[in-house]
Image (spheres, rainbow, N blue to C red):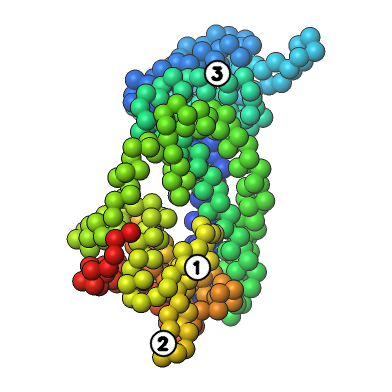
Amino acid sequence: MTRYATEFNDDLLSTIGYGLAIQEPPHHFSRIFSLFAAEERRKILDDAYDNARKMGVSKRDFTLEQFVVASVAGCFGWERHETEGAIAIEWDFDPANATALRLPLEDQIMVREVIRGNSYRGLAIVVAGTTLDPDFLTQHEFSHMFSRVVGARVLSPEQAGAVASCVTQNRKSFERFADQGSGLVADAGVFPSGAIPDRDSAAEMQHNAEWLGTLLASNEEVKRLLLHSQTEIVKPDSLFDRFDLEETASGLFIPLKSSLIIAKSMRDVVTAIERDRNEIRSLSPRRFEEVMRALFETLGFEVELTQASRDGGADLLCLRDLHGIPFRLAVEVKRYKEDRPISVSLVRSFVGANAQFQANKLVYVTTSYYTQPAKDFANNYASHLLTLTQNEQIKDWCQHYLNDGVRLL
């Protein structure tokens, strides 16, 4: 493939990988279990083990170690069968086989660390893989029991806020996958044939696009089931009332007293960013957008901070009068980690969305970096319209803000 086609195919594959990960229950429950200490995770494991023994009608009893080994190795299964008119669940594995398994070294280590309470991902695999089998994902009995378990382990407002926020963040993972995946599938349908060197490359791209389309088709149903189960277990509303939490604009739950810290002056925030760009990481994506609004106001624009939107829309709409002529600027803001680049598909989506807001100039702002295809697209196809900016430009804007001595927010 050409470099452009290879980059696009890599985007397809990475998005497929992301979709496969988020549609697996352990991905989401890892976030929850990471918020507990080792001792609390061990208690959660004990409760899950006891629950599996009570719910199952096993042919043989099994120890805690056998339960973890079977879960990590995947040698378990649930069976439905009629018992006097009711649906029963059978724990279907032979404990002798579970203890005799020759697991890979990494799985042996995971089993040991799960039992010690040190592996939150391993615990997520055990809980999600054994008691959250897809056929019983929303089973009320387990959800009701486990919500009491989680609730009893949450001991502080900060921990309660973090646990409650997990459901919101998991929902955003599904939405992010849907946004990025649908854009790539659409782009694959109109990908220029001249950029694909041979039939094999074209077939590979088509295969990956179809695979991604299949994942997207199941995304909503998997999201509904997983989020319903997590909401039943975590019960954010209950934690909200119990610990006096409030929801931020970015969907995080925080103790009410923490809002005093978040509400510090914009000048303090900008000063911190100007001194150390890593301070940006402490801001929520929405708070970072608010910072960018303040910076563009300093540049003489009237700025509208749009409602939180999907990728491709403008986060800021800026208007300024230039010698009697209205000048409209649209800004897309991405507070990404340094190792998460802005792909060409994101840049193309932003340029395409200008049909809606009709800006004279587009500015893309990120805290990470742009892939080479994204830069090529900006330089070759949108140089008259689009400017790509990164951390150095943000620092310059911060210095301008502080030198002008603008008002505090």
Of the numbered discs 3 and 2, the one sitting upstream in the chain is 3
Front: mark 2 or 1 = 2
User: Where residue 296 sits in the image (x, y, percent)?
Assistant: 36, 71
Q: Quadrant of residue 192?
A: bottom right
In the image, residue 283 lies at what x, y percent?
Answer: 34, 52
> How many other residues sit within 10 Å of disc 2, few (<14), some (14-19) or many (≥20)?
few
Residue, far bottom = 323
Hey, what amino acid is under mark 1?
Ala
For the residue pair 295 and 45, the one nearer the viewer reads as 295
- How far is mark 3 from mark 2, CA to CA? 64 Å
Compared with 145, 333 (above or below) is: below
Whether residue 101 can be seen here: no
What residue is drawn where x is 44% and y is 39%?
246
Q: Position of residue 350 (x, y in %)?
A: 51, 71
The numbered dot on residue 322 is 2
Which label's residue is closer to the chain start, 3 or 1? 3
Is the residue marked by circle 1 packed among few (<14), some (14-19), or many (20+) residues within 10 Å? many
Q: Is residue 229 left or right of residue 106?
A: right
Query: In the image, what residue type sits under mark 3?
Result: Met
Residue 308 relative to residue 340: left or right: right
